Image (cartoon, grey):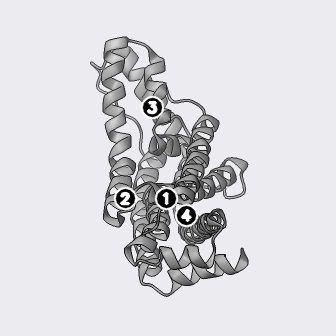
Amino acid sequence: MNRLIRSELLKIRTTHTWWIFALASVLTTALALALNFAQAHFYLNERLNLPSDMPADQAAQARQSFEAQHQVLTQATNIFTSGQFLGCLFVAILGILLITNEYYHQTATATFLATPHRTKVVTAKLITAVAYAGVFWVVATVIDLIAGVVFFNIEGFPSHVGDWEVVRAILLNLLAYAIWAVFGVGFGALIRSQIGATITVSVVYVVGMFAANILFTVLHQLIKKDWVLTAQVIVPSTASQIMLAPTKLFPQSPPQWVGALVLVGYGALAGLVGTLILRKRDVS
């Protein structure tokens, strides 16, 4: 197993893939930090001004949302997990490439001849994907922590770095990276085509959450039940956001642990399906 893992690590290190994704992760983390800094500055320093003619129920909801975001702890959690949205997409694509590269470069036959027990090969790929996801998480988290502490010092607010709520969010962020890496490996096993798998998972990840929000909102208008909106957690990208959100992602969103449970379930399912497919599928 150690030799297999070293082999998988070598396959990534000897290509341009890892540093391209690493650079993209750093840049998108910096962009997310800038956006979260602007949002935090607004919520922590501005007052809420509502139109006098706004209906009472809407005004109460807007005031409640603003007050929740106004908390320093909430903004600290957002800032110290910046870059998670696209970072998880990058590690998912990296997981896809661990599988599809074998077929694209026609090395799958040699790999499985050298190691006939395919389950070991898949396990090595899963471990490698999770390991790289951990590296991406470390880089993003270090950037977030350094820049975030500086930001809160400039703004004159405590950073809450040692508070459990912030630590929990950072650890859940690591879980999200790891699960999306496993999801990528499973998706790569399902769709052999490198381009097809990458485009599909990108659309599912980026567009899926917004499309699901529109779909469930329409269904809510028809059914008139709040559980319809709560059911959005079944969408993987939405579950990931719910798991990390310091406050409710939307009024009807379930608790963080529900998002975590759903995401863990998808990760386990992806790993199992990917293993079963590669064990049975012909490589030629």
Q: Which residue is mark 1?
A: 281
Q: Which residue is mark 2?
A: 197
Report the quarter where the N terminus lies: bottom right
Disc nearer the start of the sequence (3/4)? 4
Q: CA distance from mark 2 to mark 4?
A: 35 Å
The answer to whether the residues at label 4 and label 1 have Cβ atoms under 8 Å apart is no
**Amino acid type, residue under disc 3 in the picture:** Gln
- What amino acid is found at the position of numbered circle 4 in the picture? Gly
On the image, the x and y values in percent for residue 81 come to 54, 57
Residue 42 higher or lower than 88, as above or below: above
- Residue 184 position within the rendered picture, expressed as x and y whole percent measured from the top left: 48, 58
Residue 229: give x, y in percent of width and height.
43, 25
Residue at mark 3: 232
Reading the chain from its start, which is encountered first: label 2 or label 3? 2
**Residue at 42 percent of width and 77 percent of height:** 23
Mark yes or no: residue 164 visible.
yes
Q: Nearer the viewer, mark 2 or mark 3?
A: 2
In this rendering, which labeled residue sits more in front, label 1 or label 2? Answer: 1
Q: CA distance from mark 2 to mark 3?
A: 24 Å
Using the image as rendered, state which of residue 12 and residue 26 is in the foreground: 12
Q: Which residue is mark 4?
A: 148
Residue pictured at 41% horizontal, 44% vertical: 46
